[in-house]
């Protein structure tokens, strides 16, 4: 029959994707029939269908250096370093001094550290096509007691996070004496739903209460381990401990519900270039959230190359969302596999945790293929393809190094969709006599190999807003037209939701949200909002 064609492979891959999606849909439907709570929260909000990517300050900075200036500089560095284009999107403060609780019980911004307020910081981030991450705690206080926790104020606090326009909230587990993780976090989920803003919910109980058993219905990711380092210095041994603990939980991960072995240490003091690369490879094959933790304002070219390696990120961001695991150990070497990808290829990692170089033979039967199969091998750090070859592949791996491979019947190795937007916020101001019509656009593109289907608007837009989506290759334009006819003076807000639907299965590949503000009767003209 000759060499399989690209179309042939894509057809097989589509069938595979279709099968997986239908199986999970049926599962979700069955669960829905039995109980009103979805088994996977993301089945409703479409958030974090691939592992969240972004940046949090804790690993590098700890508490006190955090403030608005730092977060804005990091947001700018996400863009100038190319990390945004590679998929890194969520950014914001971790435990710092962002808010306190006022006498009325409500949270108030700390304007000395954050002069624009927490909403102002969010607007800055959204104007740049990035998404806004904030932090709090499920107990009485955050860990150092620098800020109030949510206990007893769950609904007010989640309303505050929604008003600040957070897209992601990490909820820590300090000062929670007597609390039960599944109960506290479920209450916070209810509070988030009541606040009405779709927010990625990152549970941070360090594995307490075994969240991998229940948290898919509550949030989108959960920490499986203790902290990966103390602020300021990477710790390779702790990273290896977190890897080992997280590896065992591979069956719990999937689209919208991820095991989180903590933020990245790539690019921090204390790791060699080799360790940076193999650490990143491990997080990619484990489908772990990729929240960078280093100082993005001063990265070496090698750190930037590691963090923006699209071929490695393609493994992490694969839409099937499978977490790879160890399929064979031999002394100090490990073969990781079990991670099928959307095009029918598979990711394989050979990791040498020892002190001497190792030569490792990966037999095709180790990774679930027939030894007689003729397969291509793509080295995702060398960016080289070899093959087709049968039997297997032999790689030499230096101490602490890792070979990250993609193995397939075809040599095409397509990249999955990664969505990058030019803004997540539009603001209109209309004044003067008579009704006005104003228009502005948001551009969204995929950096994947294939064009995406046309984004499909979700129902429920207010009557003053019309959104039209058009497609030009990999870019799509959301044209937003507002009309003030019949509107009273005042402020209006809408959140636009669009889903990108996998054409063959009819199920969402990615969900996009952005905010539109309208002020009627303010100062003259259209305020650009970015
Ligand atoms: C815990 C979390 C860390 C960080 C600190 C802040 O230790 O696991 O990631 O948020 O709290 O104090």
Image (spheres, helix red, strand yellow):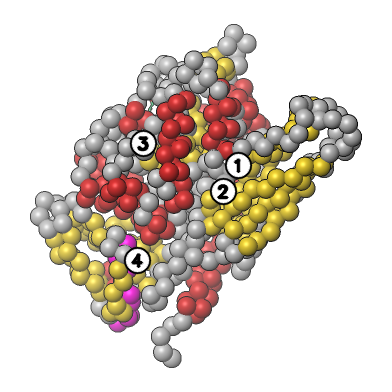
Q: Is residue 242 visible?
A: no
Q: Which span is picked out in magenta?
A: 370-380
Query: Dot 3 lies on which element?
Result: loop
* Residue farthest along the left direction in this orientation: 356
Q: Alpha-carbon distance for marks 1 and 2?
A: 7 Å
Residue beneath disc 3 = 297
Mark 4 Cα-neighbour bin, 10 Å: few <14, some 14–19, many ≥20: many
Residue receiving disc 4: 406
Question: In the depicted view, which residue is nearer to us: 363 or 104?
Answer: 104
Q: Few, some or many C-alpha atoms within 10 Å of disc 2 (few <14, some 14-19, many ≥20)?
A: many
**N-term mark: 3 or 2:** 3
Placement of 263 over or under 66, stated as above or below: below
Residue 381 quadrant: bottom left
Q: Which residue is mark 1?
A: 424
Foreground residue among 172 and 67:
67
Report, in whole angstroms, how far the alpha carbon at label 3 lies from the one at label 4.
Answer: 32 Å
Mark positioned earlier in the residue sequence (3 or 4): 3
Image point (50%, 80%), residue name: 8
Q: Specify few, some or many for label 3: CA neighbours under 10 Å numbering under 14, 14-19, or 20 or more.
A: some
- Which quarter shows the C terminus? top right
């Amino acid at each position: 029959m000759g060499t399989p064609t690209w179309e042939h492979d894509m057809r097989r891959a589509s069938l595979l994707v279709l099968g997986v999606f239908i199986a999970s849909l049926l599962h979700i439907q069955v669960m829905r029939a039995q109980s009103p709570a979805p088994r996977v929260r993301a089945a409703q909000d479409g958030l974090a269908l691939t592992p969240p990517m972004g940046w949090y300050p804790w690993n590098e900075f700890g508490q006190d250096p955090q403030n608005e200036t730092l977060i804005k500089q990091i947001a700018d560095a996400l863009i100038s370093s190319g990390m945004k284009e590679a998929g890194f999107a969520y950014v914001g403060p971790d435990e710092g001094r962002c808010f306190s609780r006022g006498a009325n019980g409500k949270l108030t911004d700390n304007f000395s550290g954050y002069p624009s307020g927490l909403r102002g910081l969010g607007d800055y981030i959204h104007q740049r096509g990035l998404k806004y991450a904030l932090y709090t705690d499920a107990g009485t206080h955050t860990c150092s007691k620098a800020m109030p926790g949510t206990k007893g104020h769950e609904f007010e606090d989640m309303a505050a996070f929604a008003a600040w326009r957070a897209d992601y909230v990490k909820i820590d587990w300090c000062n929670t004496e007597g609390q039960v993780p599944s109960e506290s976090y479920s209450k916070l989920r209810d509070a988030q739903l009541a606040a009405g803003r779709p927010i990625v919910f990152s549970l941070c109980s360090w594995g307490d209460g075994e969240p991998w058993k229940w948290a898919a219905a509550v949030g989108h990711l959960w920490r499986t381990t203790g902290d990966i380092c103390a602020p300021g210095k990477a710790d390779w041994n702790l990273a290896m401990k977190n890897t080992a603990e997280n590896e065992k939980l591979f069956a719990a991960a999937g689209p919208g519900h991820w095991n989180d072995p903590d933020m990245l240490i790539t690019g921090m003091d204390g790791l060699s270039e080799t360790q940076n690369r193999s650490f990143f490879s491990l997080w990619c094959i484990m489908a772990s959230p990729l929240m960078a933790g280093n100082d993005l304002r001063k990265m070496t070219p090698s750190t930037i190359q590691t963090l923006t390696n699209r071929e490695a990120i393609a493994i992490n961001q694969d839409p099937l969302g499978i977490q790879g695991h160890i399929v064979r150990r031999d002394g100090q070497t490990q073969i990781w596999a079990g991670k099928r990808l959307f095009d029918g290829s598979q990711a394989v990692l050979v990791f040498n945790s020892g002190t001497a170089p190792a030569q490792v033979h990966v037999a095709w039967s180790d990774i679930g293929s027939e030894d007689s199969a003729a397969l291509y091998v793509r080295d995702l750090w060398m960016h080289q393809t070899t093959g087709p070859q049968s039997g297997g592949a032999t790689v030499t791996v230096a101490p602490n190094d890792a070979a990250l491979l993609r193995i397939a019947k075809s040599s095409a190795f397509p990249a999955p969709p990664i969505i990058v937007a030019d803004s997540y916020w539009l603001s209109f101001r209309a004044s003067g006599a008579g009704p006005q019509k104003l228009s502005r656009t948001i551009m969204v593109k995929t950096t994947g190999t294939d064009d995406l289907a046309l984004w499909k608007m979700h129902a429920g837009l207010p009557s003053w807003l019309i959104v039209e989506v058009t497609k030009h290759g990999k870019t799509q334009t959301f044209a937003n037209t507002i009309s003030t006819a019949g509107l009273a003076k005042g402020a209006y807000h809408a959140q636009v939701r669009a889903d990108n639907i996998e054409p063959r299965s009819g199920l969402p590949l990615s969900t996009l949200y952005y905010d539109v503000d309208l002020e009627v009767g303010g100062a003259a003209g259209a305020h650009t909002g970015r």
